Every structure is written in C-alpha cells, then in structure tokens.
Amino acid sequence: MTSSYSSSGAPGFSGPAKKQLGQHFLADRSYIDKIVLAVSPKDGDRLVEIGPGQGAITLPLLRRHPKLTVIEFDRDLVGPLAAAAEPLGEMTIIHRDVLQVDFTELAAGSPIRLVGNLPYNISSPILFHALDHAAMITDMHFMLQKEVVDRMAADPGSKVYGRLSVMLQAFCKVTSLFVVPPGAFRPPPKVDSAVVRLVPRDPATVGILDRKRFAHVVKAAFGQRRKTLRNALQNVCTPEQFEAAGVRSDARAEQLDVAQFIALANVPYEADA
Ligand code: SAM
C-alpha cells in the first residue's frame, strides 16, 4: 500500500512514500542538524544507520564522518541512495530487513553506534532486537513516536510507566532529547515524534541473573497493572519471594522501580545459591 503523498523530492528519488514501510522522510533541515549534533560522530566511530530512506540524515552524517553502514529494506531506494552518497564518502548498504541483521556479527568485535529515524510500525521489535546485541552497541539515537519515547523514559508512578520503561531502563540509560512535529516530515505522520538517546549499561553491572525470567516477571506484572502484585504475579512469584526481595506484594507494578523488579526476578536464583 502506498500513501497519496509523493516523496520529498530529493534528487534522484522518485515515487510515492510506502506506508507499509513506515516511510516518513525528514525534510526539515533544523531537525536533521539537531540529530547530527546529538550523534556528534568522532574519528574511529562505527556508525550504522537503520532505514536511511532518501538520505535525509545519512548524507549530512557522511559529510561529518565519511564512513557509514546503512540498512535499508526498500530496494527502490538503494540505487539512488548509493549514487547520492558516492561523492561524500564510503557507504556500505545492507539491503535487508533490519530485524534479520545480527548486530553482533556486524560489529565483529568492535562496537557500533546505531542511528535511525525508525519505521514506527516496527519500532518496538527493533528496540528489543538491538537490546539483544547491547554488548556490541556503544549507543543509539532513534527517532520514534513521542508517545513511545515518553513511555521509554517514564519514572515509576507516572501514568505511562510500564513494561517498555522497565525493560529499556534496566539495560540502557534512556534520555529523551527533543520533540519533532509532524510538519518536519514528508508525508507528515499523524503524531508528534521525539529523538531519544539510549546508552547500554555494562552487562556486568545490570545485575539481572536471567533475562527471560526478568522479562516474564515484568510482563506479568504490567499485564494486569490495576491489580496488586500479589494477584498479578500469583503464578509467577510466591509470598516468600516477595519477602526475600523486600518488595511489598500489595503494591502495584507502576510503583516498583527497576531495581525492585530486578530484585524480585532474581530471588529464586539467590535463594538457590
Ligand atoms: N531516515 C530517513 C529519513 O529520516 O528521512 C527515512 C526514515 S523512514 C521513517 C523509515 C525508513 O526505514 C524507510 O526508509 C523505510 O524504507 C525503512 N525501513 C522500513 N522497514 C524496514 C526494515 N524492516 N528494515 C530496514 N529498513 C526498513
């Protein structure tokens, strides 16, 4: 399915934006500059951009840092993008679904920095895919729906604090940087967007003994966020485990901070030790 908007008209690119690929091309120079400034590439950085599209961020980044890898799924964009990048620097194009790209393999032992105005329809899967490879990622600068960034950065007690907040904040330092209005894109999305910086924490200091167990506890707790944890986690945590973790079972999920979720998920392992 294609949208009725034409593309941004960047040289060499033609055809309508593809809605099913989440194509909203950034067209406002001031926001592009802000993203490049937020990334501030340094010599030796290994930059990888997800979804370069027509090169709105790619080409200014290449001017600052003449070596870049990009991952783009839309075959119609690959040729014109390669031609536009050619005079500016060395750009490697991976023409694939980003969810099929193994970032650890791509890094090959030398950590990468991720950048992207992400396709909003698959932004959460991309975030969780990146988290799986966090040990090989220095940082990430992503444009997402503002509502998603608000949830990622929310503190306990906030209405939008939830599973995404806890899962992201457990593994990364999350900083919401700035808001971008719909008018900055062609075609404009229906909602505000925001740019977020994620810096993965050192796996040795995160303190989660079993990621699967942690994800299960967090999912179950927020699955029934209006209930007390005692009820929401009745098949997941025993009263003894609440006690061992020092977490009140009459609290609700939205009242627990990330460290408390980690303590609760770790208990069986600490008890077994
Ligand atoms: N970076 C460009 C910009 O800011 O103008 C384009 C951003 S647009 C929101 C998202 C881009 O991601 C599009 O170029 C789209 O084709 C690409 N894309 C969508 N799904 C993808 C996937 N699964 N893997 C890689 N790229 C994808």
Image (spheres, grey):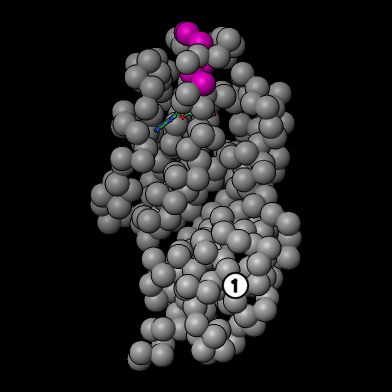
> From which residue to which does the magenta span run?
14-19
Q: Position of residue 29 (x, y in %)?
A: 65, 26
Which residue occupies the foreground of this view, 22 or 72? 22
Q: Position of residue 123 (x, y in %)?
A: 50, 41
| Figure quadrant of residue 71 | top left
Q: Residue at x 49, y 78 (%)?
A: 237
Residue 15 sits inside the magenta stretch: yes
Can residue 262 be seen at all in this image of the molecule? no
Q: Secondary structure at mark 1?
A: helix
Q: Residue at x 29, y 46 (%)?
A: 102
Figure check: 226 above or below 28: below
Figure check: 5 above or below 71: above
Q: Quadrant of the C terminus?
A: bottom left
| Figure quadrant of residue 70 | top left
Residue 167 sits inside the magenta stretch: no
Q: Residue at x 30, y 52 (%)?
A: 104
Relative horizontal placement of residue 186, taking residue 263 as reference (left or right): right
Q: Residue at x 40, y 18 (%)?
A: 77
Which residue occupies the foreground of this view, 1 or 42? 1
- Kind of residue at badge 1: Asn
Which residue occupies the foreground of this view, 41 or 120? 120
Figure check: 20 above or below 94: above
